[in-house]
Image (cartoon, rainbow, N blue to C red):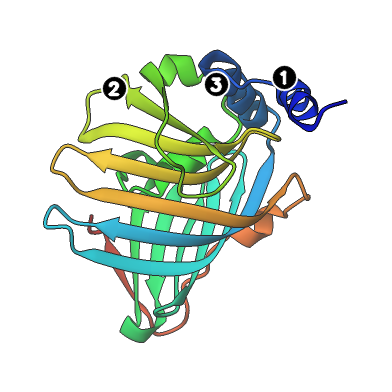
């Protein structure tokens, strides 16, 4: 068989990933997900394009539990036990506390997506972008939230082989962005609920409300 004909036939055998199948695949992935853990890089870009980068390890678990362990540039912990959210910065000797229902932090959407299978109810429109993905091999999906908040769009980079979200960008109406890049992803490993319980260290001040 001529070389170019063989290449053409091989290309035809690659399954095409269209917009609908990508959304369906992500929904199925979320619906069957009981827990999630990954290394993460978080990049915040303000309206003046100034960037701040942090990294660490993330754990998510149904229902509405999460644990962000930051290691760089400093140690800190952002954790939800499904009722309250805590932000602990050891260097400051301070814990900020807020009810989950009152928190608008950009880390929260990841927790609420876990175990959900209704993206079409949460977003009004979906677009498959032809731009080059940040992570090679992923498909880029843009979604517009149905609810009226300062969140204007969500961009997902999805691995079409398993429909895992590898990168998430939250765009806000003021021009700021929060970006999350995930690696070493593990799904449904049996994470214990005790991991999401937070005990305030002795001698640490508790402050009501988490600054946005």
Q: What SS does tag 2 mark?
A: loop
Q: What SS does tag 1 mark?
A: helix
Q: Is residue 196 visible?
A: yes
Mark 1 vs mark 3: in front:
1
Q: Earlier in the sequence, mark 2 or mark 3?
A: 3
The residue at 42%/30% (across/down) is 130
**Nearer-the-camera pick, 38 or 7:** 7
Q: Residue furthest right?
A: 1
**Nearer-the-camera pick, 103 or 170:** 170
Q: From mark 1 to mark 2, how far is it between C-alphas?
A: 40 Å
Counting other residues with Cα less than 10 Å from the Cα at mark 1, is it few (<14), some (14-19), or many (20 or more)?
Answer: few
Counting other residues with Cα less than 10 Å from the Cα at mark 3, is it few (<14), some (14-19), or many (20 or more)?
Answer: many
Q: From mark 2 to mark 3, how far is it between C-alphas?
A: 19 Å
Residue position marked by numbered label 1 in the rendering: 12
Residue position marked by numbered label 2 in the rendering: 147
The residue at 54%/52% (across/down) is 66
Query: What label does residue 23 carry, if any?
Result: 3
Quarter of the image where one finds residue 6 = top right
In the visual, does 64 lie left or right of 122?
right
Q: What SS does tag 3 mark?
A: helix
Q: Earlier in the sequence, mark 1 or mark 2?
A: 1
């Amino acid at each position: 068989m001529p070389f170019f004909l063989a290449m053409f036939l091989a290309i035809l055998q690659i399954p095409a990933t269209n917009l609908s199948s990508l959304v369906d695949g992500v929904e199925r992935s979320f619906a069957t997900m009981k827990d999630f853990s990954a290394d993460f890089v978080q990049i915040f870009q303000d309206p003046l394009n100034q960037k701040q980068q942090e990294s660490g390890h993330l754990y998510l678990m149904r229902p509405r539990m999460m644990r962000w362990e930051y290691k760089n540039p400093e140690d800190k912990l952002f954790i939800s036990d499904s009722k309250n959210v805590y932000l602990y910065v050891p260097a400051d000797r301070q814990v900020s506390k807020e009810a989950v229902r009152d928190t608008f932090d950009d880390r929260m959407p990841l927790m609420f997506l876990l175990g959900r299978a209704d993206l079409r109810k949460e977003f009004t429109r979906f677009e498959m972008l032809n731009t080059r993905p940040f992570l090679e091999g992923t498909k880029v999906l843009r979604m517009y939230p149905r609810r009226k908040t300062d969140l204007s769009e969500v961009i997902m980079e999805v691995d079409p082989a398993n429909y895992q979200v590898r990168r998430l960008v939250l765009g806000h109406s003021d021009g700021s962005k929060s970006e999350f890049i995930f690696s070493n992803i593990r799904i449904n490993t049996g994470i214990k609920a005790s991991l999401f319980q937070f005990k305030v260290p002795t001698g640490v001040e508790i402050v009501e409300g988490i600054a946005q």
